[in-house]
Image (cartoon, coloured by chain):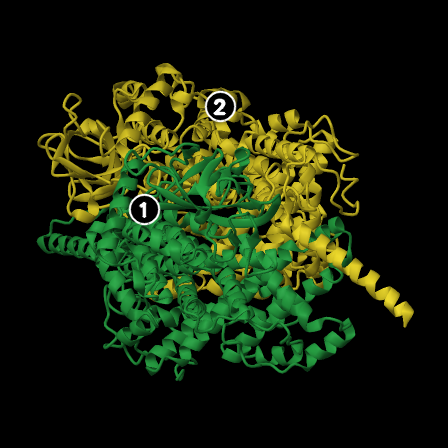
Chain colours: A yellow, B green
Amino acid sequence: MTEVVDRPAGKGPRPAAGRTGAANPAGGQPAVDVAALGEQLLGKWAGVRLQARGLAARPELHKTEGLTHSDHRTRTFSQLKYLVDNEAVHRAFPAALGGSDDHGGNIAGFEELVTADPSLQIKAGVQWGLFGSAVMHLGTEEHHAKWLPGIMSLDIPGCFAMTETGHGSDVASIATTATYDAGTQEFVVHTPFRAAWKDYIGNAAIDGLGAVVFAQLVTKGINHGVHAFYVDLRDPETKEFLPGIGGEDDGVKGGLNGIDNGRLHFNNVRIPRSNLLNRYGKVASDGTYTSPIASPGRRFFTMLGTLVQGRVSLDGAAVAASKIALTAAIRYATERKQFNASSHTDEEVLLDYQRHQRRLFTRLATTYAAGFAHEQLLQKFDDVFSGAQDTDEDRQDLETLAAALKPLSTWHALDTLQECREACGGAGFLIENRFASLRADLDIYVTFEGDNTVLLQLVAKRLLADYAKEFRNVDFGVLARYVVGQARGVAIHRTGLRQVAQFVADTGSVQKAALALRDEESQRALLTDRVQTMVAEVGAALKGANRLPQEQGAALFNQHQNELIEAAQAHAELLQWEAFTEALRDTSDPGTKTVLTWLRDLFGLSLIEKNLAWYLMNGRLSMQRGRTVGQYINRLLVKIRPRALDLVDAFGYGEDHIRAAIATGAEKARQDEARAYMRSQRANGQAPVEEKVLLARTSAAAAAHAKASVTPGSARR
Amino acid sequence: MTEVVDRPAGKGPRPAAGRTGAANPAGGQPAVDVAALGEQLLGKWAGVRLQARGLAARPELHKTEGLTHSDHRTRTFSQLKYLVDNEAVHRAFPAALGGSDDHGGNIAGFEELVTADPSLQIKAGVQWGLFGSAVMHLGTEEHHAKWLPGIMSLDIPGCFAMTETGHGSDVASIATTATYDAGTQEFVVHTPFRAAWKDYIGNAAIDGLGAVVFAQLVTKGINHGVHAFYVDLRDPETKEFLPGIGGEDDGVKGGLNGIDNGRLHFNNVRIPRSNLLNRYGKVASDGTYTSPIASPGRRFFTMLGTLVQGRVSLDGAAVAASKIALTAAIRYATERKQFNASSHTDEEVLLDYQRHQRRLFTRLATTYAAGFAHEQLLQKFDDVFSGAQDTDEDRQDLETLAAALKPLSTWHALDTLQECREACGGAGFLIENRFASLRADLDIYVTFEGDNTVLLQLVAKRLLADYAKEFRNVDFGVLARYVVGQARGVAIHRTGLRQVAQFVADTGSVQKAALALRDEESQRALLTDRVQTMVAEVGAALKGANRLPQEQGAALFNQHQNELIEAAQAHAELLQWEAFTEALRDTSDPGTKTVLTWLRDLFGLSLIEKNLAWYLMNGRLSMQRGRTVGQYINRLLVKIRPRALDLVDAFGYGEDHIRAAIATGAEKARQDEARAYMRSQRANGQAPVEEKVLLARTSAAAAAHAKASVTPGSARR
């Protein structure tokens, strides 16, 4: 279906500025079936997404720009009530309590709220995705009955009090304690020092009446590790902190100012024994601790497992924000002219410039890739949380997949929002066009719910562990032979996790394949090979690190930290590329498939271009071949240009989601008005003559005169 | 003076967390003379900078975070008065009017204001750097006498009304007209259509009483091109627009909300003939136009030439903001521990991680490079504006230099602010730590006063023009021979502009030189070679484009737009590298010189690593050599680590400039408190036993017991 791929590149006919229907393909160019592509992009939870988008389109939920953080907080809180009233946020809760036990659908709907106001989305996430979810997943039926109704209805706004000032990513080391007092059958929740204050906690500064507090559970002199406790924070009437509880407002932030983040501390606060959320660990009245999970380490990771849904939803929200930005910037670029309409490049709009295409289309391609990858992640998440596929291995795969994709998509969103803002010049900086607002709000997405750099290291550790598992007790000569003997194209793990053992060291065949960079198998081979080689190299370098004295082992690891993170990123990029490629198989319309294939190729080749030095140094691409990568990308840009509007239209967001003054056709209307004025001036003979035109005329006349006066003389001579 | 460069890389002794004096070098490591380096960084206008920093340290001038844009505007306006009262902003104005004719010093002092509040800086720039400067440079003595005193005293807040909604970067095409009416001896200023509204104009929404309006000067039916006119905008008493003038507020922006940007339009507004700022173009009472500059094109560029000071000052302000961010992030990283203090990596702080070093030190190196390059730019600016070296060529060199450096430094500032914010995790997102606030304010620096992408294209055109000039009438075979015959190391043009003719095509010698990547000459050869080759390649590809029909010529140009921009960027990076290298010659202290040389090498090698694919594909580096670039960078990071605090201390900013809660030592105090608590718990026997420790003990005991009970039995058998 890519029969026109080989056509010589040319500027090709362009659609008129503004919207071009897919039904009207220009001059034999493949057309995009925008409606069908739109349905494909909506994915499995299309119904929920459309419902959520309907809600997100309502002005009641839109961010009001320019509010103080206090006023923004007030508005956001009232919007949470609006969500409750409109039944938008209970999908994940038990049917018995009015929910629908729909975990995937819950995340899908939640993600779409980012288009209304990211503060609204994240505050909803704090209330129902973290606070409520912790009660549901870590508590038992008594807790559900007692607190979930109030949490669902927002009668109990609450906090997920895990992070402490002294420990960001290292939850196991939090210092808040909950010590059991058998005499009173109470836990004593206590903050021993300043570094143990809970920090950055949503709902903590103002609204939170209750909290799930994570603390070290101590009973009978034994610390059983981090557990979750339900703690009442404030008097529901006065909204004052209860005795022993104190806090601080985190104040203004770089964004998300609709959320009242704050700090909390506890001075020997007593809570009933039954406030331990005891699904994974119980304390009997005499203080005896029991748990269904014997290993403290495994118990800890099981309890933290529910956190994965935050990462999943941020991945999806980041993709949604990227789509909004690209829709606005690409629409504007089809109307805006950089230079004077009177110059020879009369019809040239911003999107006709090669650099502008590069800036926007490469990011459009990545957005498609990230979107398809997110859909796979969401399905995996739903499989695990619905119980359909819920083995330990499934959970680990889900964790690794989320840890791989969330960093890439959230960084991509910031990059895309910024590039779109710059591509729209000064207009891009006005809040009315939303790029700067969304960027500020999404900034924190790259470090919360798992710092991106830390998450990628988790992915790297998993890759190394898989690698080590595969080659345990195998010496390196054997490994090399084994590796070379692997065939390419071994069946792909459904969850997207690459088997690092599928090592393609047959550089000869890769080089040959690379003769056709646009070929799917060549791209796969190059991308896969890079991940596998990088992991194998770091694995070899770290071989035996575990047997070194701890300090030396850590130092060795640190010397390869950068490579490790790069390997994890390469792995995540490969997952995105595979997801895009799988999606092509589900695209039936031939024109759409052709255009999407160009876009996938643009994504794949951009990755190869970014890491071109690696491919050259490792002999995967010849120098001659390497030089063609940039050229081929440039040709793809030209091919994609006529279908760019279709590709953003397929995202399916309406004016009420985009809400950017520059994406409304206003620019074209202004230009039409200007042209009409110029035309009428010329027609009336009112247009002044330009001095430089006059000068040119005068000097031409003078030259003619000079020539006329000289020639006869010459003739006379 | 680099005698320890070749030492085997190792972790080396680290300074204790917190501040380490340069006077106390650890274990033979080279020491940095922080005071001397600080003086070197202050540069030629050290006195003015210190004075401006003293002012910027005052709370009266500090940004109040969380204000509405209205309140922020009010505060910023009052701060402008404070600047007047403190004689901070008149250095560039004529001595006769109370200024000091000091152009370089004026910019130096202005740049430092960014540390107080970028809104304050830019609003001051609008008032005195644009509005006042236009009256000064484009007007004549009558205008100076009439308006400069009020502008200087802020009695006349005013606008620089150039940009229109329909034309951002293309000033020549603005559509506002000023048509001379000889009958009344007035100009009629008129906005013919919506696209011709002035837009994004500082002081336009609220404060502006007057404006310098740029419009097409039409007299006797001839359009003489863009000229500047003084127009009264508002009644000084009522602050209402005068008849015929209207406008709109641009509203909330992504940052710089202390400035009241807005739109202006004119409906046949009549102004006296004498309001034409007529230094470069006069209209006699009968409507006859005369100009000291015959060519309309040259006249236009001369009038726009004063705009360069905006670019120069943004370049410096961007460097200052990068310094603030890196100081805070590096200080924090010397205190903050990522994981539990009880783990084996007890003493590991964030800055000991390889990745963290890579994130911060590469940007530290670029900041030094950008700072040294800025100092050269500022001197060039002062030479031109003081008249000391003010030929046409000097002015063109200044324009090109500013167009090259401003894009790199402003993008670098955004990148650095973001990386520092992420490197500080959630704390980085709190406004109290300022990264997000500065980033939001500096965002627009990359597209105003010349869009960065457009500026780089101007640089590229200059490079191509120089190239064409050099090789006019020379066929390509001759060129190649000429080029190969060039010696390396031809005298460097003092202004920093490379002569592209110095083409080093002797790849053999470059490859040989590259055997020592840390060698200054090798780095220079690699960086220079790349610029020259790229320009030559694009030049060859565009050869004859001028002789093609216009549309084809433009299309050919567009096909190489990306390469052109990359060549311009490479050129600008080389200028930064050369400036850094020249600065090393002015560094006399041996230890400082050693450390700065590492930092320069890190900058140079980071550039080479970024473009490694180019060097490999073009045969400038062997694949084996290419693989060592990353390794050598990693070794440099380890060497720089112990001196990182010195390198940010040398920036010379105090607590009142940094104003980041995380850079105050608070983190270390919290950790000390936590450690003391843990120690006392253990001493008192109050510390609970960890379950996993207990389990380990129990299973060890069980194993011992099992062994004990089995062994005798075995013996018995």
The numbered mark 2 sits on a residue in which chain? A
Tell whether B205 sits left or right of A145: right
Q: Nearer the viewer, mark 1 or mark 2?
A: 1
Q: Which of A107/B268 is in front?
A: B268
Residue A27 point in image, percent of width and height: 79, 34
Q: What whole-number distance in Å separates the C-alpha atoms at marks 1 and 2?
A: 50 Å
The numbered mark 1 sits on a residue in which chain? B
Question: Residue beneath label 1, please?
Answer: B156
Tell whether B55 sits left or right of A83: left
Q: Secondary structure at mark 2?
A: helix
Q: Which of A568/A448 is in front?
A: A448
Q: Residues within 10 Å of mark 2 (few under 14, many from 20)?
A: many
Q: Is residue A149 above or below residue A41?
A: above
Q: Secondary structure at mark 1?
A: loop
Q: Residues within 10 Å of mark 1 (few under 14, many from 20)?
A: many
The residue that appears at 77% across and 52% down in the rendered structure is B549
Residue A129 appears anywhere in the view = no
Residue B382 point in image, percent of width and height: 41, 68
Q: Which of B686/A402 is in front?
A: A402
Question: Residue beneath label 2, please?
Answer: A53
Q: Is residue A59 above or below residue A27?
A: above
Q: Quadrant of the C terminus of chain B?
A: bottom left
The residue that appears at 34% across and 66% down in the rendered structure is B102
Q: Is residue A52 above or below residue A425?
A: above
Residue type highlighted by circle 2: Arg
